[in-house]
Image (cartoon, rainbow, N blue to C red):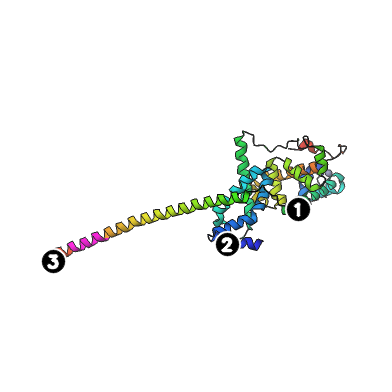
Amino acid sequence: MQYEVLNCEDVADVLADCARGESALPVEARRHVEQCLRCQAEVVQYRKLLRALHKMRTELLEPAPGLLAEVLVGLEVAGERQALRSALAGKKVAYIGGIAAAATAAAAGGAIVLVRTRARRLAS
Amino acid sequence: MPEEVAGLVAAAQAGDRKAFDELVRVTYLDTYTLAYRLTGNEEDARDVVQEAYLRAFRGLKRFRGEARFSTWMYRITANCASTHLGKRRRHRHEELTDEVVDELHSGADPEASLEADSLRAQLQEVLRGLPPKLRAVVVLRDIYDLPHEAIAAELGISESAAKVRLHRARRKLREDLFPMPADDDACNDRDAHAV
Ligand SMILES: [Zn+2]
């Protein structure tokens, strides 16, 4: 079976993925790494690097005081704006509702007038 | 902690403002840490944290319980940091570049380097020296474990671009952490191909 001969540059990008356990090395890459001390050393270095990066996940950095208060104040302002907007939107709905109710009342009133007129006409 | 967070999320989604404040209280150090790692400085990190919680507050109804709240917050923070840094650069008329500038160690105090004897301390330093665009992908992938497609989506780049940046970032970090002795290796044609 013929394999493509790869050099260090060809396999460079997959070494870290392999060290992270994301992907297995393709056959050709593995053949190169098995014979190349330099690439083997790099895999070991990537493992150390990735382990150290992974550990950083649980470290927390401490900001200068005041950040929490700043965020909470910002949220309060945003919350008030949101409440105001929905209150205004509510009023708008009430206003439109008022117009609709008035129109319905007017239409109903008109209908009553019409019925009376017809009734009068029938009576006469 | 995750159950506590889930309870707070549910209460906040039901309109309990106090619950959202409490959610901020229990998660903001985590959010700040990520923001700092992405922006590289306190001032920008604080702005990003502010913006991220405002966006989370406005978008909370859209949050579905399938993802963890922390992951959702990381994505929002990454997106805010990317927008924030983009705006800053445009403001300063800087070119958007992800070129690796090799001056990380040139100005470094040798005594300070000696003090940074643990790998972790050195890693913090070399990470800070990465260009923001490269730093973002390696932080989100290798520290916070976000999937490639999420990273690409939040940074506004293609998935393949995110992978290319990740490879470059990891390589730069490795080279800075484990500098090679003078090259006498026959198997060394890498720099000629480096992008
Ligand atoms: Zn090799």
Between the C-alphas of marks 2 and 3, the distance is 68 Å
Comparing B163 with B18, the one in front is: B18
| In this rendering, the label closer to the viewer, 3 or 1 | 1
The magenta stretch spans residue A114: yes
- Mark 3 lies on a secondary structure that is helix
Residue B63 picture location, percent across and down: 58, 57
The label shown at residue A55 is 1
In the rendered image, the residue lying farthest to the front is A65
* Residue B113 visible in the snapshot: yes
Q: What residue sits 56% from the left and 56% below the top?
A: B60
Please name the amino acid that badge 3 sits on: Ala
Please name the amino acid that badge 1 sits on: Lys
Chain name for mark 1: A
Please name the amino acid that badge 2 sits on: Ala
Q: Which residue is mark 2?
A: B10
In the rendered image, the residue lying farthest to the bottom is A123
Q: In this picture, which residue range is highlighted in magenta?
A: A108-117
Q: Which residue is mark 3?
A: A123
Q: Are marks 3 and 1 on the same chain?
A: yes
Can you tell me whether the CB of the residue at mark 1 lies under 8 Å from the nearest atom of ligand 1? Answer: no
Comparing B108 with A108, the one in front is: B108
Q: What residue sits 62% from the left and 37% below the top?
A: B89
Q: Within 10 Å of the Cα at label 1, are there few (<14), some (14-19), or many (20+) other Cα atoms?
A: few
Between the C-alphas of marks 1 and 2, the distance is 30 Å
